[in-house]
Amino acid sequence: MQTFTKSVGLISIALLASITLPDTAAARAPITKPIAITLPGGEHGLGLDDMAYLPGLHRVVVPAGQTGTLVLIDPDNNALTLIPDIAPQAVKPHGRDQGTSSAAYGADLLFASDHTDKSIAIVDPAHKRVLARAALASGSDYVRYLAEQHELWVTEPEAAQIEVFSFNAHAKPMLTPKAKISIPGGPESLVFDSAHHRAYANLWKTKTVVIDTATHQIVSEWSNGCEGSRGLAMDAAHARLFVACKEGAISVLSLKADGKVLAHTKSGEGIDIIAYSPILHHLYVPGSKSATLTIFDVTPSNSLTPLATYPTAEHAHCVAADNQGHIYVCNPHGGGVLAYKDPEIH
């Protein structure tokens, strides 16, 4: 684990109002209060999007939109560490097409999007500085690192493709363009299935595509039960894929049975990004229109049992979670994140 400076003075924390749980969850879930963490520079709102927990760093990474910085949150105490100069600062309120909105971790480095220059910044998190940059063919959305192939994959929805780079970590870290995977009607979201050498991405409507990571070719399309496909999360141990449906539902797909829909469950309206804890077997589902966070227990029989539903904030559409019960929901209009604790963690 890297050593980080705790910038405690930069954190603005406030307890929100008490939360009333629905009757179905109240017996198992104690009443809790989220902590509101305002990100530096977010006082007037930020274009927040992709967030992730990075086990190798034991940090939650939040690409802080127009500020052009990456913010790392220590889940043990919510202390913040800032990495500046990922992208030029911008002033457009709430927009996700400026600054930085997605980051991945691999080879002891961070790889972050720069929307202003349409590039990827290669970042040393230990020294909090950008080491190099690589130009993109089009505007980026998700950034993901495929460790076993030393590749960086970047979804580019405007070009309906995924751009793949080879990563070289010699004297100077370098990303070299390697392939472009055409995804007509997408891509949205991206997860890797290392055990089966597959990647999964959604089309914007009703399908999930399966990509062979060795050949960079689409090998299958699965109907996912959604009207509007959005975020993905995977449970590798049980070979199942969770698909978020914008209209307010979650589908569970079998990775062993060619994407067979095992379950389809309603949740809060306006679902986008979701997160899964393989330790707790919990799925975290924010609804941006319903302004809720629903926590599901995923059973061995693939049913989704709601444990709790908490209020969040308008447009709170993204989430990240570690394996110790800490949950972070983005709050774009509030310029920060809301920190929750899983109801089964005491």
Image: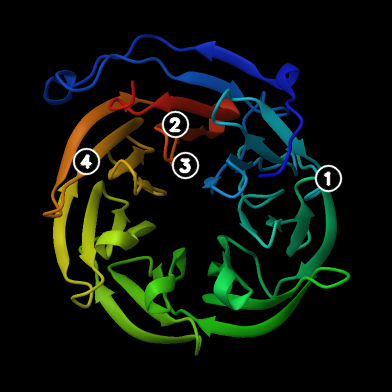
Q: Residues within 10 Å of mark 1 (few under 14, many from 20)?
A: few
Label pair 1/2, CB-CB below 8 angstroms: no
Q: Could you say which disc has been placed on residue 320 in the image?
A: 3
Determine the residue positioned at 59% across, 25% down: 78
Residue drawn at (34%, 41%) of the image: 284
The residue closer to the viewer here, 62 or 93, is 62
Furthest toward the front, the residue is: 1
Q: For the residue labelled by badge 1, is the local secondary structure a helix, a strand or a loop? A: loop
* Residues packed near mark 3 inside 10 Å, few (<14), some (14 to 19) or many (20 plus): many
Q: Looking at the figure, which quarter contains the C terminus?
A: top left
Q: Earlier in the sequence, mark 2 or mark 4?
A: 4
- Gap in angstroms between the C-alphas marked 1 and 2: 26 Å
State the image coordinates of residue 321 (x, y, percent, origin top left): 44, 40
Residue bearing mark 2: 326
- The alpha-carbon separation of the residues under discs 3 and 1 comes to 24 Å
Residue designated by label 4: 297
Instruction: Report the disc number at residue 237.
Output: none
